[in-house]
Image: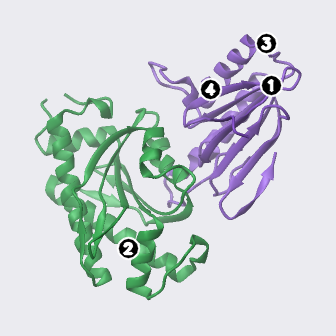
């Protein structure tokens, strides 16, 4: 039966989404390793269904500044993929690629920005390619959009986009581990409800 | 100010006499401060979407139309008079520039809906800080009726 709200997902369906998240973020971590030239692993990804305000606490509070890379999915799955890059992650990327660090997001110039956009874009594309291969669904992606601002407002973008459908937001994502150091990189996938139902049907876990 | 009341997304709170109402990180969302200066009654609503088309209507504060209407109703129940109530708003930004999709328009649609609904309810809009591409934290002092907007990389603004 098709679900009408994220909190109606069965445990089998949640497990399936966790598996998708695991595969997607695993692929993203491999792509990131290759790009940065250092080993990147991924912790067990979580699938979370959260209320709006809970989601903002989960990501680390509303006013914290973060870099966000956003891509819209279209085709057979509609939704938003978001890469929230907190300062630790930003510095790991910049150190590996440009051999520099920043103390504040204000120090980001064009070069650093395009580096972060590219990293976000590659992780998102790899994630989606793995997903679309597994489900046999065609997914198109927009050119990545980028902003540096309060993370509460960044997270509110997928919430507002699907807010008319649900009071909850679903996120699939995990933490990356570089050289035994755990860095929270929030890679979030928020499909709309119709696409989520279609995806679960395609994977054969939704009982008709 | 220790007695700060925090308003979440799709949430509303009222304070009387003294008190600071605050809502964090408004992106495309809008914070609406409603104030009756005569009795020092203030409310802050954090709306996310322009129009309530939900069948169940479980959360009126999520939408501009039902959020404003419901808040005014509660303020009137606490002694506020419609003719004295004024409004100040902040938010409605476009956080991401995404090609040709409708994604970025929610902020603009929210602004238009808030304007329209304030007008429909006969509420005067005194000041606003809306649009653009920056997130805003909005603080509202119920005693003075002054609002303060805090953004990343921008000076504080009093509204």
Q: Quadrant of the N terminus of chain B?
A: top right
Q: Are dots 4 and 2 on a single chain?
A: no
Q: Quadrant of the C terminus of chain B?
A: top right
**Secondary structure at numbered mark 1:** loop
Which chain wears purple?
Answer: B
Which chain wears green?
Answer: A
Gap in angstroms between the C-alphas marked 4 and 1:
22 Å
**Secondary structure at numbered mark 4:** helix
Q: Chain of mark 1?
A: B
Disc 3 target residue: B79
**Secondary structure at numbered mark 3:** loop
Counting from the top left corner in percent of width and height, residue B26 is at: 61, 46
Q: Are dots 2 and 1 on a single chain?
A: no
Residue at horizontal 80 percent and vertical 25 percent from the top: B17
Looking at the image, residue B6 sits to the left or right of residue B38; the answer is: left
Q: Earlier in the sequence, mark 1 or mark 3?
A: 1
Q: Are dots 1 and 3 on a single chain?
A: yes
Counting from the top left corner in percent of width and height, residue A174 is at: 29, 57
Residue at horizontal 80 percent and vertical 23 percent from the top: B122
Disc 2 target residue: A119
A144 above or below B92?
A: below
Gap in angstroms between the C-alphas marked 4 and 3:
19 Å
Disc 4 target residue: B67
């Amino acid at each position: 039966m098709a679900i009408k709200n994220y909190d109606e997902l069965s445990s089998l369906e949640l497990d399936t989404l966790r598996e998708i998240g695991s595969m997607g973020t695993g692929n993203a971590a491999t792509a990131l390793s290759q790009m940065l030239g250092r080993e990147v692993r991924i912790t067990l990804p979580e699938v979370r269904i959260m209320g709006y305000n809970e989601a903002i606490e989960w990501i680390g509070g509303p006013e914290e500044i973060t870099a966000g890379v956003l891509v819209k999915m279209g085709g057979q799955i509609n939704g938003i993929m978001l890469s929230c890059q907190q300062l630790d992650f930003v510095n790991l990327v910049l150190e590996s690629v440009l051999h520099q660090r920043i103390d504040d997001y204000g120090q980001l110039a064009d070069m650093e920005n395009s580096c972060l956009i590219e990293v976000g874009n590659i992780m998102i594309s790899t994630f989606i390619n793995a997903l679309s291969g597994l489900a046999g669904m065609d997914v198109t992606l927009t050119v990545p959009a980028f902003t540096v601002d309060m993370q509460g407002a960044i997270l509110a973008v997928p919430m507002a986009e699907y807010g008319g459908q649900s009071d909850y937001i679903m996120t699939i994502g995990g933490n990356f581990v570089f050289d035994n150091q755990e860095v929270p990189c929030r890679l979030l996938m928020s499909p709309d409800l119709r696409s989520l139902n279609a995806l679960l049907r395609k994977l054969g876990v939704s009982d008709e | 100010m220790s007695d700060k009341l925090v308003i979440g997304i799709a949430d509303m709170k009222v304070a009387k006499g003294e008190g600071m109402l605050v809502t964090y990180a408004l992106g495309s969302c809008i914070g609406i401060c409603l104030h009756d200066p005569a009795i020092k009654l203030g409310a802050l609503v954090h709306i996310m979407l322009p129009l309530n088309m939900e069948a169940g209507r479980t959360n009126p504060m999520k939408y501009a139309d039902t959020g404003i209407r419901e808040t005014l109703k509660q303020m009137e129940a606490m002694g506020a008079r419609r003719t004295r109530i004024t409004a100040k708003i902040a938010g409605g930004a476009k956080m991401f520039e995404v090609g040709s999709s409708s994604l970025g328009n929610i902020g603009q649609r929210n602004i238009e809906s808030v304007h329209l609904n304030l007008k429909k309810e006969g509420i005067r809009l005194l000041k606003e800080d809306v649009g653009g591409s920056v997130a805003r934290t909005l603080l509202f002092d119920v005693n003075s009726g002054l609002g303060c907007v805090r953004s990343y990389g921008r000076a504080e603004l009093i509204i």
